[in-house]
Image (cartoon, rainbow, N blue to C red):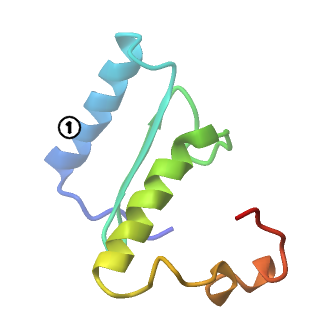
Amino acid sequence: MPQTTLTHPAHTALDELLRQAVSHADVPFVVLMVANRQQVLYRGAVGTSPDSLFRLASMLKPITSVTILMLAERGLLSLDDRLEQYLPDYAGRAVID
């Protein structure tokens, strides 16, 4: 994982924000990563390890949907493209239309 590149005050402010969220019982734990196209800018966690594995359940669906719509808007894919064009392991899977 690349080193973080946020300024020390910004890094400290994010650390404090995460600590406050857990200490005020807003969330039981929190993991946050901030990145741009080149590198990870911030990586932190409170109440768990940044490397912990946990289920995101259905929260990936809205993130994936927005990402795909952004790519379609930029002309990088079409909503009518077949999934196996991007993920070959899904070729030949049955889909209910």
Viewer can see residue 74: yes
Question: Is residue 22 shown above or below 43?
Answer: above
Judge the density around disc 1: few (<14), some (14-19), many (≥20) Cα neighbours within 10 Å: few
Q: Nearer the viewer, residue 73 or 48?
A: 73
Residue pictured at 34% horizontal, 10% vertical: 24
In this picture, residue 37 sits left or right of residue 91: left
Instruction: Determine the secondary structure under disc 1.
Output: helix
Q: Quadrant of residue 91?
A: bottom right
Residue 25 lies, in percent from the top left, at 41, 11
Residue 56 visible somewhere in the drawing: no
Relative to 81, is 11 above or below?
above
Indicate whether 31 appears above or below 42.
above
- Label 1 amino acid? Ala
Left or right, residue 57 beside residue 32: right
Residue 11, percent from left and from top:
25, 47
- Residue found 44% across the figure and 70% down from its top: 2
The residue that appears at 29% across and 77% down in the rendered structure is 73
Closest to the observer, 42 or 95: 95
In the rendered image, the quadrant that contains the C terminus is bottom right
Give how far across and how far down residue 12 sits, in percent.
23, 40
